[in-house]
Amino acid sequence: MQGRGNAASPGVSLGGWHFAAWGADADNAPMSTASGHRFWLQTRLLTGGLLAVWLAVNLLVPWFARDLNAWQAFGFPLGYWLAAEGALLVYLAIIVVYMVAMDRLEAAYLANEASSTAGPEGPGPESA
Amino acid sequence: MTAPAGATQGADRDFSRMLARRYALFLLAFFALIAVMAVAERLGLPRGWIGATFLVVTVAVYAGIGFRCRTSTPVEYFVAGRRVPAVFNGLATAADWMSAASFIGTAGVLYLQGYAGLAYILGWTGGYCLLALLLAPYLRRFGEYTVPDFLGARYGGQLPRLIGAAAAIGVSFVYVVVQIYGVGLITSHLTGFGFELGVFVGLGGVLVCSFLGGMRAVTWTQVAQYLVLMVAFLVPLTWLSVNQTGSWLPMLTYGSQLERVAEIERSLAADPTEREVMALMAQRAADAERKLLDVRSAMLDDERRQQELIAELRAENAPLVRIQRAERELAQRPRTEIQARRLYERERDSALARAASLAGMPPQTLPFAVTEPGVNAAGGGSDTAPQRFDTARINFIALVLCLMMGTAAMPHVLTRYYTTPSVSQARRSVAWSLFFITLLYVAAPALAVLVKFEVLQHVVGLPFDELPAWVNRWSRLDPSLVSVRDVNGDGLLQFGELMMAGDVIVLAAPDIGGLPYWVTCLVAVGGMAAALSTADGLLLTVANAASHDVYYRVIKPRASAAARVIASKVLVMVIAFVAALIAALKITDILQFVSAAFSLAAAAFFPALVLGIFWRRANRAGASAGMLAGLGVCGWYMATNLPLLRAWFGITRPLADCQWWGVEPIAAGVFGVPVGFAVMVVVSLATAPPDEETMKFIDRIRLPQPGER
């Protein structure tokens, strides 16, 4: 475990016992290239960010539903509308953003791998 | 539907165009069928004929598609040749996903529970985010045949694969039984066959799609079934909306009806005759409570009173129907003390619920209504109201999260993403799936509101002898679906005197709105499409888990490709028959298991799949322990909380002591999943890390491969 981690990404992977490996897991990837690491890091940032939005919707929309109902949206009480339609649109938006961003990330990674130059110019997850 | 294998980019586009043309033709033909039936009804074609024609024609089309797609090549049979374009895989997944319960039940739950029903809407759509971000693209890149395949490849050894196969079989089998049950109900409703015959006719409908062509046939029939079920849902919804508000886009405009429903609800809550009904219901609840004190003598009392009633009816020469009904009630009286106790408890609970305002239903838009319990309910009183409000909120969120994780972990849905041509297409396909699913789930709350408006505005307050025909028709069919009783004897129907079960809201919506009979048939055919498409997908999942993961991977690894397909076909047949036999027993309690299926699927698969992709360190011991622990916690929580299972295991500890933070057993997954994650992490860390081979495997799953796009 340690040897492999060090070979791929020095300075991030820690040797020693398993608990060290848990914290460092993310980056001790024996991925063949630095762009592989970069790609996986960007993927995880994108995934984590979108899941945070997803979780916020899941928790906040129901929790404050009664308070939100004091407002109106498109002729509906807001709390009701968010749970019946609004959240669904957010879910769809999350997936579409992910789909577009991942297509770009992958294209950049593959182009980089193909030319195997040192400086990859893939758009970050924020660009989507 | 039969494109050359090994399609290239250009051929892909041609394939998509051809599919679009064919399904557009199919849709036109379906509209033509509808038009012909509408005209035929005008011309006086008997009702039975209309229903039967709808049923026969649609099932014949599904069968035709299934027959054309027959195959015995594994890649075709198990994953439809991996060339299903994203849009069509989205359509197929939507049909696969939306079961009879989604089609028939969701609007019903929303009608009865108002805001609380939206948990299903949120849970069954938001789960696709998890699917898209955490699972689908990685499974596609892995590119085998089943979900246990992934567990087997990632963790090595047989144990994770076998646990996965067992969970997939268990979860999907329960679900398939219920779909076949639904098919049986609808068939008998449309044709007048007996229920058992209906089940086996429905079984034929399921088998013709999946038996010959496996995933390939199922995919292309599901696309057609999606179109049918969507049309069947939107026609009555739009029609009702145009009648009520003149709007052709009810999903955007039903807010105005929501407001009018709220107004009527407010006035009903203050209505003196409604209050009278409520008081009488509270009285009934108290009566039932008294009977429970001495069940034995109450049974004798009831029997004597029923016999007196029959004698009285005979003496006054009452209509034969009433005498027969009284006699039937006498014949069906409970025989044992346990049965009687259960009956009285049911009586008490239902009366108690209806002793609250609006027959115990919360106002449509009020989230987490904490209805004041009826008179003398234990623990009643306003001081516990804030606490119950919080419990309601927690339960709502717990259920939402559970349904989401269950959605993302349902093996029959996951398998669908093996069938797209590429990883990118798999992601695109999840977006399309959610889009097509959202179309129905945005429509369901709208239908619930429009039907409620119709009932409140046009039915409540009518004299009993002027009630619309549907009330009598449905209550004759099954009093547990619709029943009316003049509780306060004023000759007018109060809202509190009308009982409607959730399952009739969609099926009876055309009746309730006064639409022609062909719309009723159309809705039934839509429900049939929803049930058939889900049943097909599930049946294949069960059969493939057994034939591919157990038979081929474990028992006989050297089985030839042809043998594997034959094994799966035989299993599809056998499992379908067993499921139909169980469905024919009409065990209604099985619904409890369905709601449980989501929690079990979530606990079994979600941690093992997600950590398998996102955490290198996860290993075989961790995954096996995590899956078993998650299933164990879910199973334990259900066994101690679900009434049926409590009875089976003879658990006597009070229900309140068995609940954790007041969470309902339907959301047991909120405990099972975190426990699964935790156990998996701890056990993985305490045992040796996965080997070099696995590390390479993880890289292959995570990174795009050259030439993959």
Image: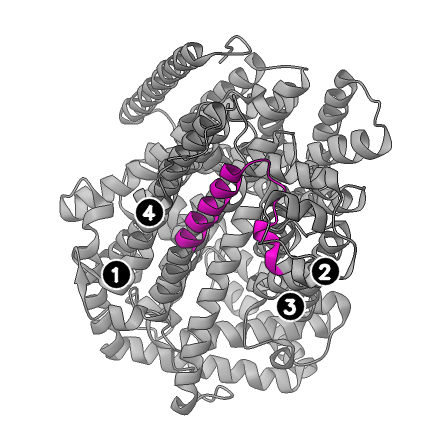
The residue at which mark 1 appears reads as B456
The numbered disc on residue A126 is 4
The residue at which mark 3 appears reads as B643
In contact (CB < 8 Å): disc 3 and disc 4: no
Is B373 or A91 nearer to us in this picture?
A: A91
Q: Is residue B331 visible?
A: no
- The chain identifier of the residue carrying mark 4 reads A
Residue B274 at what x, y percent from top left?
29, 75
Residue type (three-letter) at the residue carrying disc 2: Gly
The residue at which mark 2 appears reads as A16
What is the CA distance from the residue labelled 3 to the residue labelled 4?
Answer: 50 Å
- The chain identifier of the residue carrying mark 2 reads A
The span shown in magenta is A23-51
Q: Vertical placement of B70 versus A116: above or below?
A: above
Q: Residue at x 69, y 58 (%)?
A: B631
Q: Vertical placement of B390 versus A89: above or below?
A: below
Q: Vertical placement of B406 versus A37: above or below?
A: below
Residue type (three-letter) at the residue carrying disc 3: Pro
- The chain identifier of the residue carrying mark 3 reads B
Mark 2 vs 4, N-terminal side: 2
Splitting the image into 4 quarters, where does residue B645 fall?
Answer: bottom right
Marks 2, 4 in one chain: yes
Splitting the image into 4 quarters, where does residue B641 fall?
Answer: bottom right
- The chain identifier of the residue carrying mark 1 reads B
